[in-house]
Image: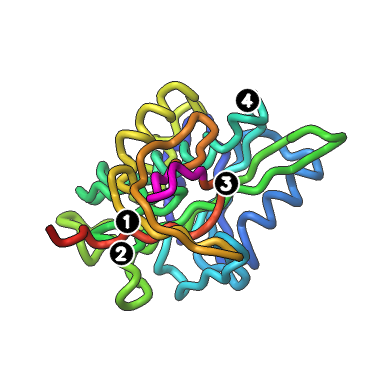
Amino acid sequence: MPPPTPNTGRWHLERVPSTGSTNADLVARARAGEADGLVLVADHQTAGRGRLGRVWEAPAGSALLASVLIRPKLLVSDLHLVTQWVALAAVDACREAAGVTPELKWPNDLMVNERKLAGVLAESVVEHGRVAAVVVGIGLNLSWALPEVGVALNDVAPNPVTTDQLLEAFLRALGDGPDPERIRRDYRRRLSTLGQRVRVELPTEQFEGLATAVGDDGRLVVTTASGPRTVSAGDVIHLRPMAP
């Protein structure tokens, strides 16, 4: 018997046992005219992707693997808020369902004790020179994680949960869609990167400094010895506090 379908509100939920990538599937469907509000969930992905083209893999049934298709009425400069919205919804879902409140690490990772619990990846669908849709995918470790660098929710939760319980809480947390003012406020409040000494690793260089702000455009401001620098993409590593 298939698992029960959670109460999805405005979201139309589809589930598949396995696929290459839920993001890739929804991007293709968005291009074919799929309406706003589709959420695709898979028990397993054979070609999951993370940031910067990295491969993302997990054993079948060990993670929440979901992508959301929306056609947001946002300015192009605000589209990054869609990724933050999904990350914040995942934080809320973990707190509600499992009693764990992850921290956010810039730009889109959920962390517990500096180990990665989940990542979020957004892809835009451009038609006739405008963004017609955004697909946002999340992979959240539930019962398995990479040793040393990752963490599984049920390994740290006072209330271990099933994928269905977490999914239902996630859909509720998505609400009616992205609210720019609330997203900016909550993202900054929950972003553990702010106030941290960090190392920024870019394709051609790396530098260290203090993460001091996030602009309305989603870029991270890092104050270095030579002055502030703005980071739009790259790996940001939290460093241990310097000894007095």
Q: Which residue is mark 1?
A: 111
Residues at marks 4 and 1, CA–CA distance in whole angstroms: 28 Å
Which residue is more in the foreground, 109 or 154?
109
SS for tag 1?
A: strand
The mark that comes first in sequence, 2 or 3, is: 2
Residues at marks 2 and 3, CA–CA distance in whole angstroms: 22 Å
Residues at marks 3 and 4, CA–CA distance in whole angstroms: 15 Å
Tell me the magenta residue range. 222-230
Q: Can you say which quadrant of the picture contains the C terminus?
A: bottom left
Determine whether label 2 and label 3 are within 8 Å by CB.
Answer: no
Q: Position of residue 243 (x, y in %)?
A: 15, 62
Residue 56 belongs to magenta span: no
SS for tag 3?
A: strand
Which dot marks residue 74?
Answer: 4
Residues at marks 1 and 3, CA–CA distance in whole angstroms: 18 Å
Q: Can you say which quadrant of the picture contains the N terminus?
A: bottom left
Please, what is the three-letter code of the amino acid marked with disc 4?
A: Leu
Please, what is the three-letter code of the amino acid marked with disc 2?
A: Arg
Q: Position of residue 233 (x, y in %)?
A: 56, 51
Please, what is the three-letter code of the amino acid marked with disc 1?
A: Met
Which residue is more in the foreground, 113 or 169?
113
* Residue found at x 49% / y 63%: 206
Overall secondary structure of the magenta section:
strand
Query: How packed is label 4: few (under 14 Cα within 10 Å), some, or many (20 or more)?
Result: some
Q: Position of residue 77 (x, y in %)?
A: 63, 30
Q: Which residue is mark 3?
A: 136
Residues at marks 4 and 2, CA–CA distance in whole angstroms: 32 Å
**Is 153 drawn above or below residue 165 in the view shown?**
below
Determine whether label 2 and label 1 are within 8 Å by CB.
Answer: yes
